[in-house]
Image: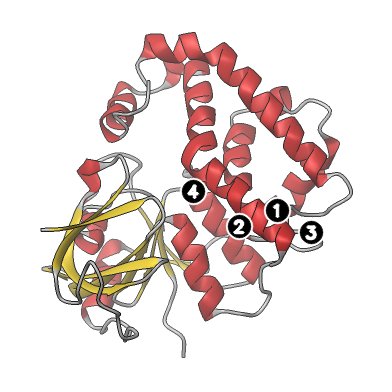
C-alpha cells in the first residue's frame, strides 16, 4: 500500500493551492495538517529543520520542501493522468517559474497596498522579516501600487492571448506551468482584484474555471503529533547512488532558499544531482528524516 500523502499547509496559501489543485487533477487522496501562516511554526520545524514556507509534503519520513519539487516528486510516483509534456509545456514551465519567484510577489505587494488597513501588523512584520529583499514597508507599497497594476495587467492580458484557442498552457491537457501560473491568479481572484486586472480576458477566465475545478479538499485531517509519529515509525526511502563532485555523500552541508538566510537547514548530504538535494537530519520528535529540496533557486554550502 502506498504511503499516505500528508500536506502541511494553510488554507490561504497560494503555493498550497497550487499543490491542492494538482492533487485534485491527479485524483490523489491526501491528508491535511494545518500550519499557522506566521511564525512560530514548531510542528513544521520539527520536520524541516528550519524551512518555514507552505506547503510541505510528508511521505513517511521523507519531507519535500517547495511546491515545484512536490509536483515533480508526485509526478514521478504517480504516472497516471500525466501532466502534458513537449514544447508548449516546456515554455509554460519557464513562465511558471517566473510566476513562482517574481510575479507572485508583485501580486502580493499589489494586494497588500490595497488592504493595508486590514493587514495585521504581526503578519506584515513577519513578511518583512521573511523577505528583507522586498520593499514591503507601508509607504513603499502604496507608492508602488500603480506601476504594479500596470505590470500585472499587461502580463495577464498576454496570458489570455496565449490561451486563445487552447484549453491549457500545456495544450489540450494541463502541464506543471498551468498550476504555477494559476496559484498567483487564484490569489488575486480571491481578493477581488483579478476582475479589475483581467477585464475582458475571456480565455483566461475560462481557463481559471477549468483549473479551479481540479482543486480538492483533503481526504482526511490529522494533527501534527500524528504526522510526527508516522515519520518516527518509518524509514526514509532508499536513494540512488550519488556521484561525488563538489560535494560528497555524508558531508555536513547547509541548504537555504536563495535570499532567505533565516530558512537555512543543516544536515548530512545524502543525495545531490542536477534537480534535487536530499539532507538527512535527526529530529527529536520525528526521528531520522530525509529532507528534499530542489536545486533551482536553492543554495547548498559546506559547513
Vertical placement of residue 175 versus 137, above or below: below
Query: Rounded to the nearest whole Å, what is the CA distance between mark 1 and mark 3?
Result: 13 Å
Give the mark nearer the N terminus: 4 vs 1.
Answer: 4
Mark 1 or 3, nearer chain start: 3
Q: Which numbered disc, 4 or 3, marks the residue that appears first in the sequence?
A: 4
Q: Secondary structure at mark 4?
A: helix
Give residue 259's position: percent from left, percent from top.
Answer: 30, 39
Q: Identify the residue position indicated by label 3 in the image.
A: 171
Q: Residue 217, how many percent across, how many down?
A: 56, 60
Between 198 and 269, which is closer to the camera in this rendering?
269
Q: Residue at x 32, y 63 (%)?
A: 223
Q: Is residue 130 visible?
A: yes
**Cα distance, mark 3 to mark 2?**
18 Å
Q: Is disc 2 in contact with disc 1, using a CB cutoff of under 8 Å? A: yes
> Which residue in the protein does label 4 denote?
15
- Callout 3 secondary element: loop
Q: Residue at x 47, y 10 (%)?
A: 142
Amino acid at each position: 500500500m502506498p504511503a499516505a500523502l500528508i500536506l502541511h499547509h494553510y488554507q490561504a496559501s497560494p503555493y498550497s493551492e497550487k499543490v491542492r489543485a494538482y492533487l485534485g487533477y491527479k485524483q490523489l487522496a491526501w491528508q491535511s495538517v494545518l500550519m499557522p501562516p506566521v511564525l512560530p511554526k514548531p510542528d513544521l520545524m520539527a520536520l524541516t529543520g528550519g524551512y518555514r514556507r507552505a506547503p510541505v509534503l510528508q511521505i513517511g519520513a521523507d519531507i519535500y520542501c517547495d511546491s515545484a519539487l512536490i509536483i515533480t516528486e508526485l509526478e514521478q510516483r504517480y504516472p497516471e493522468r500525466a501532466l502534458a509534456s513537449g514544447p508548449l509545456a516546456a515554455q509554460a514551465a519557464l513562465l511558471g517559474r517566473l510566476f513562482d519567484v517574481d510575479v507572485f510577489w508583485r501580486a502580493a505587494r499589489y494586494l497588500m497596498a490595497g488592504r493595508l488597513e486590514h493587514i495585521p501588523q504581526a503578519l506584515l512584520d513577519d513578511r518583512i522579516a521573511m523577505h528583507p529583499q522586498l520593499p514591503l514597508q507601508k509607504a513603499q507599497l502604496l507608492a508602488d501600487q500603480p506601476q504594479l497594476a500596470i505590470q500585472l495587467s499587461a502580463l495577464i492580458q498576454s496570458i489570455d492571448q496565449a490561451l486563445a484557442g487552447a484549453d491549457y498552457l500545456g495544450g489540450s491537457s494541463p502541464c506543471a506551468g498551468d498550476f504555477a501560473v494559476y496559484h498567483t491568479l487564484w490569489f488575486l481572484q480571491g481578493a477581488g482584484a483579478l476582475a479589475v486586472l483581467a477585464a475582458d480576458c475571456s480565455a483566461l477566465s475560462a481557463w481559471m474555471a477549468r483549473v479551479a475545478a481540479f482543486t480538492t479538499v483533503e481526504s482526511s485531517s490529522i494533527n501534527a503529533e500524528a504526522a510526527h509519529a508516522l515519520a518516527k515509525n518509518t524509514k526514509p526511502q532508499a536513494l540512488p547512488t550519488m556521484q561525488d563532485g563538489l560535494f560528497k555523500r555524508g558531508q555536513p552541508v547547509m541548504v537555504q532558499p536563495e535570499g532567505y538566510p533565516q530558512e537555512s537547514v543543516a544536515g548530512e548530504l545524502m543525495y545531490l544531482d542536477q534537480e534535487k538535494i536530499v539532507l538527512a537530519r535527526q529530529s527529536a520528535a520525528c526521528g531520522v528524516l530525509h529532507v528534499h529540496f530542489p536545486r533551482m533557486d536553492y543554495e547548498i554550502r559546506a559547513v
